[in-house]
Amino acid sequence: MLDFCFTIPYGLILVAGGVIGYVKKGSTASLGGGVGSGLVLIIAGYLSLKAFEKGKNSYLALVLETVTAAVLTWVMGQRYYQTSKIMPAGIVAGISALMTGFYLYKIATGGNHIPAKAE
């Protein structure tokens, strides 16, 4: 399980959610939060992908992914607690909590496992 395989789609979902929130409700907070955090995750996923292609791990990308997902879990969890609205706060908090757990697992196990080169 490579982190960028989950991070890039997660980032795209957040970007799409931010745009949808803006289009449907005119929410600039949704646009800024969704697009901003989504782009950070897409960039982190791209950094991780490029490092993996070079046979390395990008710990910078892994830290960015973990911090972004943890902040989203906290912020959207607080919003869900205040409003009890499952959409979008509960969904984003839940997905972000799962992703935070995944990233912490990746950190604990040393990042992406680079396959040994056959000679």
Image: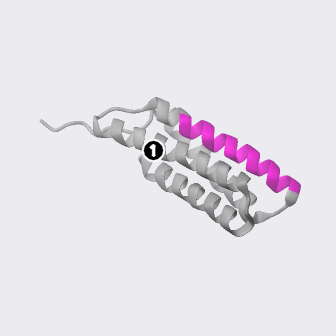
Was residue 87 drawn as part of the magenta stretch in this picture? no
Q: Residue furthest right?
A: 82
Q: Quadrant of residue 103 in the image?
A: top right
**In x, y percent, where is residue 24?**
70, 69
Q: Quadrant of residue 18 in the image?
A: bottom right
Residue 3 visible within the image = yes
**In x, y percent, where is residue 38?**
56, 49
**In x, y percent, where is residue 60?**
48, 30
Q: Indicate left or right for 13 with 53 as reference.
A: right
Tell me if residue 48 comes above or below residue 96 in the rendering: above
Rendered-image quadrant of the C terminus: top left
Q: Which residue is mark 1?
A: 45
Q: Which residues are magenta?
A: 64-82
Was residue 81 drawn as part of the magenta stretch in this picture? yes
**Residue at (59, 55) in percent of width and height:** 14
Q: Quadrant of residue 67 in the image?
A: top right
**Residue at (53, 52) in percent of width and height:** 11
Q: Mark 1 is on which residue type?
A: Gly
User: Foreground residue, 33 or 9?
Assistant: 33
**Residue at (66, 55) in percent of width and height:** 31
**In x, y percent, where is residue 21?**
68, 63
**Looking at the magenta stretch, what is its main secondary structure?**
helix
Tell me if residue 3 comes above or below residue 31 in the rendering: above
User: Foreground residue, 98 or 9?
Assistant: 9
Residue 104 visible within the image = no
